[in-house]
Structures are given as structure tokens and as C-alpha cells.
Amino acid sequence: MLDSAGVAQILAYAVPPLLGAVIGYVTNALAIRMLFRPLAEKRIFGIRIPFTPGILPRQRYRLAESIATMVSARLLTPDVLIAKIQDPGFRASLNDSVERMTSDLLRREETDRGVTDLIEPVLTAFLRSEPFATTALRLLDDVVAGVLSLDAARFLPSDERLRRGVEHLLAALTSDSVYDAALERIVGALRTHLSSDTEVRRIIGRRVVLQCIRIVPLLYGPTFDLLMSFLRQARTREDLSVHGRDLLKQVLRRLNLFQRIIVSAGQYDRNLTDNMPAVVSDLIDGIERAGKAAHNRRRLVRSVQHRVAALGRTGIASVERELGVDLVELIVRAAETVRDTLRRPEVVEILASVARSTATSLRDRTVAGVAESVTGLSADELGEHVVTLAGRWLDDDTHRAQLAERAVDFVRSLLKRPPGGSGRVEQMIPLAPDAKRRIDTYVTDRIVEQLERRVPQLIDSLDIHGMVVQKIDGLDMRSVEELLLLVIARHLKWINLFGALIGAIIGGSQVLLRAIT
């Protein structure tokens, strides 16, 4: 058992360190407490008690500024955000969000007004913009070049469809309404040009004259075949035989008496009259052989080309005087003849045969080759001409407005709920899963690209420093205390313990010094 002297000796050594530890712990805890408390200043008899309010409540604005500066300058920096945006996990999460968004959009049920109200202003503005015109013309140029490079055979119909097409076309062209309207316009324009003696090439265009000259070789074969088909018809041969006999009679009348006696004695007139059908057949065969001869073909083509060129340089009234006819009356009569001729079944068959022959000759050529034969323009020139015409059309604001209006009408008709249908967007715009994944990936990539490019502007526009200051200032001091303690509460405990340790060391050092002395 320890006596009172032993207990006193133990207390003399134990109490100073323990008391120093308690004093150090309480002092640090009180100092930390004074950081936050009191929340407001305290007064006695109107005199403010020192150290009220606490340090943090008194320096609240500086605290908010310090935290905001730390967050904006050290935490949420452009480099940090860009690194986060480039993180594969962020990209995967963003792609999942885009997939859910597009899936929800496709599953939504929309009426014609639900989406159109959103799409209409965007679509209208885009279709009336310069970027659309530039893109459309570039796309048109590519499409024209692609079409011109295709084989013409891909666009040529079968023989039966071609025959029906010719039949329907002729029926439409020879209808009374089309015939009367066309004839009225032609006659009116012809009278105007006759009064001013306008050159033919100015009426139909110099390019048309050149195209007519260039197209003569291409038309020679079908035209000659049409002529031979006409000549070999039984009715045509009979008419030629009758005209041949009449011509023979006229020749015999012009002979003198002695010559007629010789011809009659030899019965040449009777033999020629009886054999006139055979003579006509031989004549037709001779015409066919002569027409197919290469040198005759070249001479005829060249002669027609020269005549077309000369005709183009001649005034229309001069042509009328040279021919000694009334062109208006001639046009009317010719139009009636053409209409009546085109209505004949045999002519329909002949034209269908010519169309088949022409189509056959074009099957081994490209669309560009056919177009060059008809227009005289190369593929590049034709594509440039088409793009130029389209550009002129798009330059007109009225045309762009019409295009935008039609596009909006198309969207409205597309988004109208079908009878008995659900009206979902995915039914209006069906997308295969693979196509939807590609769209989602594309949208994700574009979002990431824009975020990376605009991070500095986003940070500036968000004003992170101001947001943090405003948020902290908007909290009451208890909330600020809780916010800080969430971060530093554990560290404050160690500060208290460290104060107790320092106090214990100080108390122990006093015991040690007393023992030494």
C-alpha cells in the first residue's frame, strides 16, 4: 500500500503532464470554436464584447472570395475540364445519354404541329441561307456528273413500253386542246417575227441552229429508215405507180409524131404502163442503195448542214418571199397535216419503230454521249450549265421562299398521324439499329468536339468565381460551418489532440526540470 507521501510523489509527477494535456486540448478546442462562434456580435451595456462575432462570421466575404478563387483558379480550370471531357468514361456516359434521348424522341407520339412548330423556323432559315445554296449546287454538280457517267441503256424502256409511250405521247400532242393552244401561240409569234423580218437563228436561238447542224448525222439513219418504210407501203407504191403512168403519158404527149409512131410500134408505152409497179419497186431499191452508200450519206448530210446554216442567217420574211408562200397559212396547213398524219395507226407504228431503232443505237453509249450528240455540249459543259441555271434559280428570294414552303408542307404531311397508326416518330422515320448507333456516335462526337473547343468560353460565361461567392453568401453561417466541417472536422480533431500532446510535453518538461534542480 502506498502511503500519502507516495501518492503525493506520484501526483507530483503525473498531474503536470495530465493538466498540460487538458489545457492544450481545451485551448485548441476553444480557439477552433472561436473560428465559428459566436455567430453574431455580443454587447454588454452597448459595448461590443471582444472576439464577437467569431473570425469566420466576421470575415465571411473574404472566406467566400478565398473559396471562390481556389475553386475557379485551381479546381475548375480549362485543363481539368478538357481532361474530364476526353476521359473515355465521360464519353461513354454522354453517348448513353444521347442514345436515351434519341430513343425517347423516336418513341414519342407527335402530331403534325408538335414537331413542325420546332422544325419550321429552323428549316425555313436553312433553306433560305447561302450555305444551303452552296451545298445544294455542289451536290447537284455531283449528281449530274454521276448521272452523265451512267450507261444510257439503264434509262431506256423496253420495246413494248416504248411503243406505248409513243402512242400516248402522240395522242396527247394531237388532242384538240393541245393542238389549238400550241397553234395559236405559234401563229402569234410568227406574225410578230414576220413584221420585223427576224433572223431564223434569233427566233430559235443560235445554239439551237448549231445543235440542229450537229444532230443531222444522228438523225440521218432514223429519217432514212422512216422514208424507206413509207415508200415500201403498198398504198405508197400504188400512188407512185399512178403518178408514174401520168408522168409517162405527159412525156409521150411531148414527143413528135414520128417518135410516137416508133414508141407505139414497139409497144414501149404499154410495157412501161403494165410494168410500172416493178419499175417503182426497182426505183425504191435504187433509192435505198444510194441512201446507204457512205459517200452519198456524207454528201447529203453536208448539204443539209449547209442549208440549215444558211437558213439560220436568213430573215423569216425573206424566207417567206423566197419560198413564195404565206408562212402563216403554210404553218396552219402543215400543222393540220401533221396532226392528221400523227393520228394514223401506221404512222404510230413507224414512229415507234424509229424510236426503237434510235434506242438500240443509244444502248451502248453513256448518258453524256447521248447528251453531247443532242446538245453539242460536253459532260463538263452540260454539268456547268445545269448548275448555273440552278444557281440563278436559287438566287431569287421568291424561289427560295417557295422551296422552304414546300419543304415545310412536306414535313407537315410526313408528321400527320396515319389512320389507325400510333403517330410515333420512329414509324415516320424508321431507323435500323446500326444506323441509329452511327447517328448517336456522330452526335456524341460533335458534342465532345464542341465542348473541347469552347471550354474557356463556357467557363467565362458560367462565371464560376461569382457563382461560388453568391452561393456562399446566400447560406446562413450555420450552413457555412457545416460545409467547412464536412471537409476539416477530422483534421480539427487531430489539432485538438496535438494541443493535448503539446500540453502534456510542457507539463512533463516541468516535472523533468524540477527533478533535475
Image (tube, helix red, strand yellow):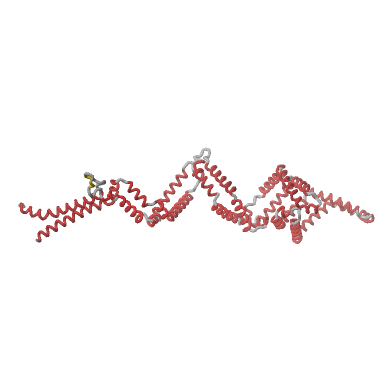
Instruction: Please say whether residue 328 is visible from this viewpoint.
Output: yes
- Relative image position of residue 389 (x, y in whole percent): 62, 53
Q: Position of residue 186 (x, y in %)?
A: 73, 47
State the residue lying farthest toward the top: 420
Left or right of 499 on screen, residue 226: right
Viewed as shown, does residue 153 lie left or right of 217? left
Q: Residue 368: x, y in percent?
A: 63, 57
Question: Who's the residue at 69% across and 51% down the image?
Answer: 355
Q: Looking at the rendering, in which quadrant would you find the C terminus?
A: bottom left
Q: How many marks?
A: 0
Instruction: Give residue 407's position: percent from left, percent from top.
Output: 56, 46
Q: Quadrant of residue 148?
A: bottom right
- Residues 162 and 30: in front is 30
Instruction: State the residue in front, 279 or 376.
Output: 376
Residue positioned 35% across, 56% down in the render: 73
Residue furthest to the right in view is 258
Residue 512 lies in what quarter of the image? Answer: bottom left
**Is residue 218 visible in the rendered structure shown here?**
no
Which sits in the foreground, 430 or 388?
Answer: 388
- Judge whether 386 appears above or below 107 on screen: below
